Amino acid sequence: MSIIAWREAKEHATLTATLGGRRVWSAPYILTSDNPRDDAKTCVDFMDTIGRGLRATFRYGDREDAFSWCKEVSPSRIPGSAHHWAVTCSYSPAEEQPPQERPDEDGQPTDNPMDWRYEISSGTQFYQVPVWKAWNVDAMPVGGTGAGYKRGANTLGPVHNSAGVVYDPPLMREVPETVIRISGNLLEFWAAILQVNAGTINPFALSWSNRMKESYGFHEQSFQPHCVLCSSVTTDYRSENGIRYWRYTFEFRLRTPADSVNPQDGFLETLLDRGFTRLANVDAPDLTGDVYYAGDFKEGMAQGEAVRGVDGQRVPEMMLLNGHGQPLTASDTFTAPPVYFRWRIHPYAEFKGLPLDIFA
């Protein structure tokens, strides 16, 4: 079963032309089948084989239109005939989407992507940190009297046991941080923007730009050094309304500086000074009531030794250190306060030359 013959039914196809150059063609054909049981699908499939079916550009007689495509094929059996079909193919240009409009920063609709307002979203996520500092609800020693490490109830200080030994591993807690994502459009792709800013923190204080405050309602706020991390910079290439551009999305994580409760200073890593080993260099105590002298050291000798207890034996637990490489000798939180050191693991970036106007 197949189509054995075809022809154009008229000298020319009909045309409907409209303002703007839009042309709609209607092209009639006569198809002959070798089997009366052939149906309309046989006709549709045949039109594809001769290059005049669906998705084919218009061609009829001596006329061609490369900008009009066949979008509809309508076969119908010619009345009174078992083998002849009338097929009409309809052609028209590809449908053009109307220009997409979005509001600019003044709320006015515009079809220029460069003028579209930023897209901004924010949320809260939690990260875990070691608990180096907390309140002991119960007094030390038990009951608050007797021999033992002296620490009154509800005293803010290091987390340790009744012997003054810091727990290892330490307690952990979840701390909230703000995550904000800001997207805007630019004409160019700048690889340096991604390389320089992603994974960096601020060395100086920052505040929102006037644009963020005036156009997007951001409350006046400043961020202390080390409290803003650019956690991600992504771009994607787009083309809308005849304009090709890049969409940039910056993700920032915002934290708070250290306070009396939380020694975590923004994105700096804060560690409690503790260890099994003490510093043993010139002028360090030698545990005999004297200090070490230059003549006490031989070439290749390490300037350190084990922290030892009253029995002269190496202590089996990490002990608090005093910030000078020596163990804290007092057993009282007030007379021997703990020492914390801050470490920076992220490179710096000032965030004031970003392609999107975010920080002042």
Image (spheres, grey):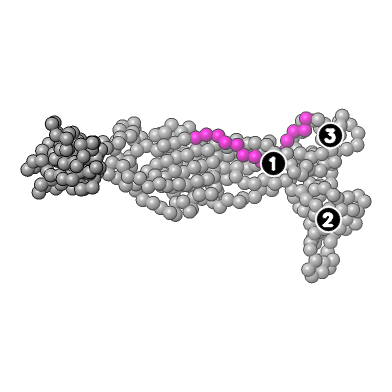
Report x, y in % for residue 93: 20, 41
Taking 286 as reference, is 65 above or below it?
above
Q: Horizontally, is 82 left or right of 231 in the view?
A: left
Name the residue beneath numbered marker 3. 140
Q: Upstream in the sequence, badge 1 or badge 2?
A: 1
- The label shown at residue 306 is 2
Q: CA distance from mark 2 to mark 3?
A: 27 Å
Residue 129 drawn in magenta: yes
Q: Residue sitting at 30 percent across and 35 percent down?
A: 101
Q: Name the main secondary structure of what is drawn in magenta.
A: strand
Q: Upstream in the sequence, badge 2 or badge 3?
A: 3
Segment colored magenta: 122-137
Q: Secondary structure at mark 1?
A: strand
Q: Horizontally, is 149 left or right of 211 in the view?
A: right
Q: Residue sitting at 27 percent across and 44 percent down?
A: 242
Q: CA distance from mark 1 to mark 2?
A: 25 Å
Q: Which quadrant does the N terminus fall into?
A: top left
User: Which quadrant holds residue 10?
Assistant: top left
Mark 1 near mark 2, Cβ–Cβ under 8 Å? no
Q: Residues within 10 Å of mark 3 (few under 14, many from 20)?
A: many
Closest to the camera, between mark 1 and mark 2, is 1
